[in-house]
Amino acid sequence: MVYKIKEIKTKVRFRILDYLQHNPGVHFRKLAKQLNINRGTLYHHLRVLERFGIVKSEKVGKFRIYYSKFPPEKYIVGTTEKILEYIKMNPNCSLNNISKSLCMLNSTISYHIKKLEKENLIIIKRNGRKIRIKYNEKCKPINNVPSSVPEESQK
């Protein structure tokens, strides 16, 4: 994806946005740890990105989780790829099975499940409140190439 928004002018913001595109639903401290960014710096950049509508956040329990408003095109990478692989290996699994096995929040799993369903990569069978998820054997494979982060100098 090509960004022409002047608010994403630092390398740090590109790194944050790229990480959130591939790992939506991540909480603040994990984001700081994974990107090796000082929490104060991260907080500032997330506020700028959120103020301009590039990133959104929501409070879930005691955590604030963050999402990019721009999906990473049609590539299946990172968290989505892990979830899809789990579903392939464990047909008819539930959201809770995936969440517990991959140690992720249900909201994160749900986001990726919706994305995979939209691309017809999985089949969801609903029975009341229970859902069972399996890999769609008839789907066309999608390229597995991650998007790149531009190499800009940070000011």
Image: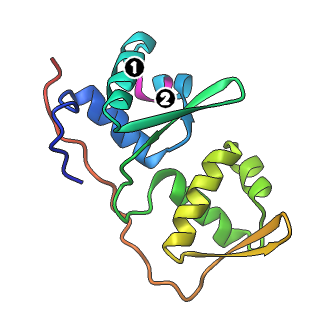
Q: Position of residue 37 (x, y in %)?
A: 39, 19
Kindly indicate the quadrant of the structure image that contains residue 40: top left
- Magenta-highlighted stretch: main secondary structure? helix
- Identify which amino acid the numbered label 1 is placed on: Leu
34 or 11: nearer the eye?
11
Q: Is residue 5 above or below residue 117?
A: above
Residue underneath mark 2? 31
Magenta range? 33-37
Q: Which residue is mark 1?
A: 42
* Secondary element at tag 2: helix
Q: Which residue shows up at 86% across the image and 69% down it?
A: 128
The reply, left or right, for residue 118 in relation to residue 6 is: right
As for residue 67 lying within the magenta part, the answer is no
Where is residue 64 shown, x and y percent of the image?
58, 27
Q: Residue at x 72, y 56 (%)?
A: 98
Identified at 49% across, 44% down, the residue is: 23
The Cα–Cα distance between marks 1 and 2, rounded to whole angstroms, is: 8 Å
- How many numbered badges does the structure rendering display? 2
Mark 2: amino acid = Leu
Name the residue at 60% across, 65% down: 85
Q: In the rendering, at what x and y percent does residue 112 appear?
A: 56, 57
Vertical arrangement, residue 146 with respect to residue 105, above or below: below
Does the residue at mark 1 contact the one at mark 2 (Cβ under 8 Å)?
yes
Q: Quadrant of residue 19?
A: top left
